[in-house]
Amino acid sequence: MAVISFEELAERLKPGEPIAGLDLGTKTIGLAMSDLGRRLASPRPVLKRVKFTRDAEVFLAFAQKEKAAAFVIGLPVNMDGSEGPRAQATRAFVRLMGEKTDIPFVYWDERLSTVAATRALLEMDVSRAKRADRVDSAAASFILQGALDRLNLMADR
């Protein structure tokens, strides 16, 4: 199983199942996890990308350790709504991961997530060197928090 809709995710999740957020970069994969109540996203250490096979092993070990029930992955859509090479690379990553795991993926429009994450780190007065290390996980947390907020709005209806 590779990709499901957000509505399918809301239907499938059982109480107490956390979900992971991902910000897929060319050099790193930013990670975040929800709490068991799926109210709050928390950043996790970034994974340095090497090659797909090794990246998949490390990523799936993380998912198993954290007991992730689903992955919300940022889809880097252009400001005009079109998809460029980075969105295609993200879709290819998900397609290949779908062959290695039954954990479903949900795409989340990540426009401006890195900008928002960088701004938040600046507001916290994080140094430039530390910002470079943390921005991908902060972006993953921002992506996941948006998804969690939407899930909670859907549950309140």
Image (cartoon, grey):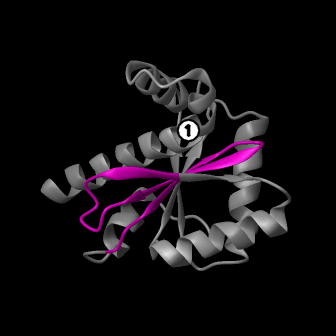
In the picture, the quarter occupied by the N terminus is bottom right
Q: Which residue is drawn at the image coordinates 63% and 27% (left, top)?
A: 129
In the figure, is residue 32 to the left or right of 75? left
Q: Secondary structure at mark 1?
A: helix
Between 15 and 136, the one nearer to me in the picture: 136
Magenta range: 17-44
**Can you name the residue that lies furthest to the left here?**
156
Compared to residue 117, the image places residue 125 above or below, namely: above
Q: Which residue is drawn at the image coordinates 47% and 68% (left, top)?
A: 70
Residue 28 appearing in the image: yes
Q: What residue type is disc 1 on?
A: Arg
**Can you name the residue that lies furthest to the right here?**
51
Q: Which residue is drawn at the image coordinates 47% and 30% (left, top)?
A: 117
Count of all numbered marks drawn on residues in the image: 1
Between 61 and 125, the one nearer to me in the picture: 125
Residue 109 appearing in the image: no
Compared to residue 89, the image places residue 12 above or below, namely: below
Residue 149 drawn at (x, y percent): 28, 47
Question: Would residue 42 be counted in the magenta stretch?
Answer: yes
- Which residue was labeled with disc 1? 134
Compared to residue 76, the image places residue 21 above or below, namely: below
